[in-house]
Image (tube, rainbow, N blue to C red):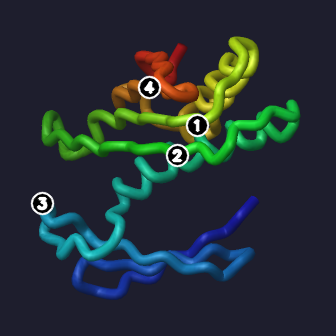
Amino acid sequence: MVEMTVDYQGELRSTATHGPSKAKLNTDAPLDNMGKGESFSPTDLLATSLTTCMVTTMAIAAKRNNINIGQPTARVIKEMTAVPTRRVARLPVEITIPVELSEDDRHRMRNAALTCPVAKSIHPDIDVPVTFYWGPGRVEEKTDTRH
């Protein structure tokens, strides 16, 4: 169990504090929803949480299996909808593993990313297409984290 606290700062901004480390992060409502967009919005954090969870879970699996994955990078785009209510509609993710991996190791890394705890916690109405870039020039697409 990990406790986080949130203090509303006014002007649609909050400060969250991570209990164990006391690290802080600020949020701001987005420009398209009355905010100033000067920091991550709560829905930006959802997208960021998904992507960092995928990369971290891959790194854990790589470490457990003694697989060199180099220094992966990832990109996510948050797409909102207002129908039927304002919510996150789509989170396309791109993950780049800069080194060549065997088919077995790609399978392990792909499975780790797609089954990370955040991916498994995201509502099924959110479309999460994932594209993996394996080494130079290799592309593999996965249509969704739910498989």
Q: x, y percentage for residue 58?
A: 68, 37
Q: Earlier in the sequence, mark 2 or mark 3?
A: 3
Q: Which residue is nearer to you in this view: 34 or 141?
A: 141
Where the N terminus falls, by quadrant? bottom right
Q: x, y percentage for residue 77?
A: 31, 43
Q: Which residue shows up at 77% across the image and 42% down it?
A: 60
Where the C terminus falls, by quadrant? top right
Q: Amino acid at mark 2?
A: Thr
- Residue 32: which numbered mark, if any? 3
Q: Amino acid at mark 4?
A: Thr
Residue 8, quarter of picture: bottom left
For disc 1, the marked residue is 98
Q: Earlier in the sequence, mark 1 or mark 3?
A: 3
Q: Which residue shows up at 75% across the image and 14% down it?
A: 104
The answer for how far apart the CA atoms under marks 3 and 4 are is 28 Å
Mark 3: which secondary structure? helix
- Residue 2: which numbered mark, if any? none
The answer for how far apart the CA atoms under marks 2 and 3 are is 28 Å
Q: Earlier in the sequence, mark 2 or mark 1?
A: 2
Q: Are marks 2 and 1 in contact (CB under 8 Å)?
A: yes
The answer for how far apart the CA atoms under marks 2 and 1 are is 8 Å
Q: Earlier in the sequence, mark 4 or mark 1?
A: 1
Mark 1: which secondary structure? loop
For disc 2, the marked residue is 73
**Label 4 Cα neighbours within 10 Å, binned few <14 / some 14-19 / many ≥20:** many
For disc 4, the marked residue is 131
How many badges with numbers are in the image? Answer: 4
